[in-house]
């Protein structure tokens, strides 16, 4: 027996060298190296200890992150290029992460017109793998810190869950529909483009410090990735896939091009969805604990309040406005402050809610109508398109529609 060992892989580093793992008697680290192929003797298997409570090595984390990243990106060009040489790509990525030399690739920027016009800045597939790696490490910690009625991008939550909770709010605030109640809806102006990256970074570290980074492997690497991703300028060296005239008519607060220095997160990245929840989590707790609003829920920046006292909700508007301005450097959208009696019905998460029924919203109905007016040429896709709406309508009561 010697004082160190090498385990060779079949993956090339270049024409002359291949990757290998190295272990030494005086260290519990497993190093990634590359040496001349002619020095290789054999390939040995290493025991998988993941089922024994031992944290998986970074390569295994990256493999899991890769499968998660490709779930809805299968057969896209970047995904296929990455998969064509999967082992080498993951080994190279692992090497960069362990040596803190990882750099994000240029993003792709374009305008998406459906269902509403918005700017999308999409990360390269390689970076999406890293996004899933980071979220896999920190999301379980923050999910426990979020309030129950934060619905966006969380397992077991979503729009339908939010709609059902809103129904429960109406029932609770009206004493089972016996008394009148009021509904307040608020929205943040240009939310993603107005997120202050420094405040976001500090809030993220604060949330992880709160639990002493419990359950996070390689804290230094996680901190490195947080800083790298949060402070990255997504438009730096970005490729623009849409023509310049496509931005005509898009409000300035809906584009990173017009965002303030040090502000803005790209719509389209997994990390942006998690960071959005982290950013507004202090607001959620302020509303619940300091303002004592029992019936409150939020989906991204769409906020819903239900209360039996109209004056209470009127005071809430000012309190939320001041908190957003002073603590998060955000602004309420002045045209989307809506306070009304619940029995008149209100829109929330694509539905039209009344005390005794829930109907599909106008956008869903229009899109359903258009699925017949402008059908797909592919019969199979058209059938699935119609069935998807049939599935949605099963969640609504008293649905009637004329086309």
Image: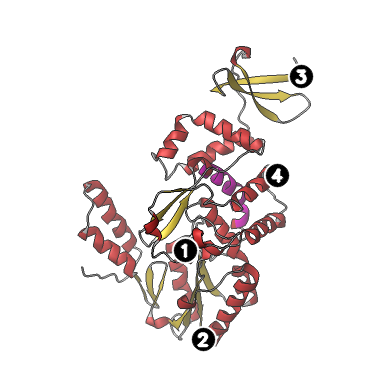
Nearest to N terminus: mark 2 or mark 4: 4
Residue 310, label in figure: 2
Nearest to N terminus: mark 1 or mark 3: 3
Instruction: Give the main secondary structure of the magenta stretch.
Output: helix
Q: Quadrant of residue 207?
A: bottom right
Q: CA distance from mark 2 to mark 1?
A: 32 Å
* Residue stretch rendered in magenta on the structure: 128-142
Nearest to N terminus: mark 2 or mark 1: 1
Secondary structure beneath disc 3?
A: loop
> Who's the residue at 53% across and 32% down the image?
89
> Who's the residue at 44% across and 85% down the image?
178
Q: Quadrant of residue 71?
A: top left
The residue beneath circle 1 is 254
User: How crowded is the residue under tag 1: few (<14 C-alpha within 10 Å), some, or many (20+)?
Assistant: many
Q: CA distance from mark 4 to mark 3?
A: 28 Å
**Are the residues tagged 3 and 2 within 8 Å (C-beta)?**
no
Camera-near label (1 vs 3) is 1
């Amino acid at each position: 027996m010697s004082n160190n060992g090498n385990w060779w892989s079949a993956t090339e580093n270049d024409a002359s060298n291949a990757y290998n793992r190295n272990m030494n008697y005086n260290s519990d680290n497993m190093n990634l190296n590359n040496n001349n192929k002619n020095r290789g003797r054999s390939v040995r298997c290493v025991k998988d200890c993941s089922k024994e409570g031992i944290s998986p090595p970074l390569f295994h984390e990256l493999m899991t992150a890769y499968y998660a990243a490709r779930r809805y990106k299968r057969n896209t060009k970047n995904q296929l290029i990455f998969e064509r040489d999967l082992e080498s790509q993951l080994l190279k990525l692992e090497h960069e992460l362990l040596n803190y030399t990882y750099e994000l690739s240029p993003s792709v920027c374009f305008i998406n017109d459906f269902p509403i016009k918005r700017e999308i800045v999409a990360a390269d597939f390689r970076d999406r793998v890293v996004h899933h790696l980071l979220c896999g490490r920190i999301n379980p910690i923050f999910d426990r810190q979020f309030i129950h009625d934060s619905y966006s991008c969380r397992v077991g939550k979503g729009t339908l869950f939010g709609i059902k909770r809103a129904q429960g709010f109406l029932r609770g605030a009206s004493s089972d529909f016996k008394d009148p109640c009021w509904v307040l809806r608020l929205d943040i102006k240009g939310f993603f483009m107005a997120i202050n990256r420094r405040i976001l970074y500090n809030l993220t570290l604060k949330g992880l410090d709160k639990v002493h980074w419990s359950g996070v492997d390689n804290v230094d690497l996680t901190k490195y990735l947080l800083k790298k991703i949060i402070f990255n300028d997504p438009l730096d060296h970005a490729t623009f896939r849409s023509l310049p005239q496509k931005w005509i008519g898009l409000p300035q607060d809906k584009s990173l091009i017009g965002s303030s220095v040090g502000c803005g997160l790209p719509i389209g990245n997994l990390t942006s969805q998690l960071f959005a929840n982290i950013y507004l989590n202090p607001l959620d707790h302020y509303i619940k604990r300091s303002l004592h609003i029992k019936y409150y829920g939020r989906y991204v920046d769409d906020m819903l309040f239900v209360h039996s006292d109209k004056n209470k909700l009127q005071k809430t508007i000012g309190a939320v406005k001041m908190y957003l301005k002073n603590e998060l450097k955000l602004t309420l959208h002045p045209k989307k402050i809506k306070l009304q009696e619940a029995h008149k019905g209100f829109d929330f998460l694509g539905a039209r809610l009344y005390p005794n029924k829930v109907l599909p919203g106008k956008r869903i109905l229009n899109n359903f109508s258009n699925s017949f007016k402008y059908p797909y040429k592919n019969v199979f896709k058209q059938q699935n398109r119609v069935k998807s709406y049939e599935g949605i309508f099963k969640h609504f009561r008293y649905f009637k529609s004329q086309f």
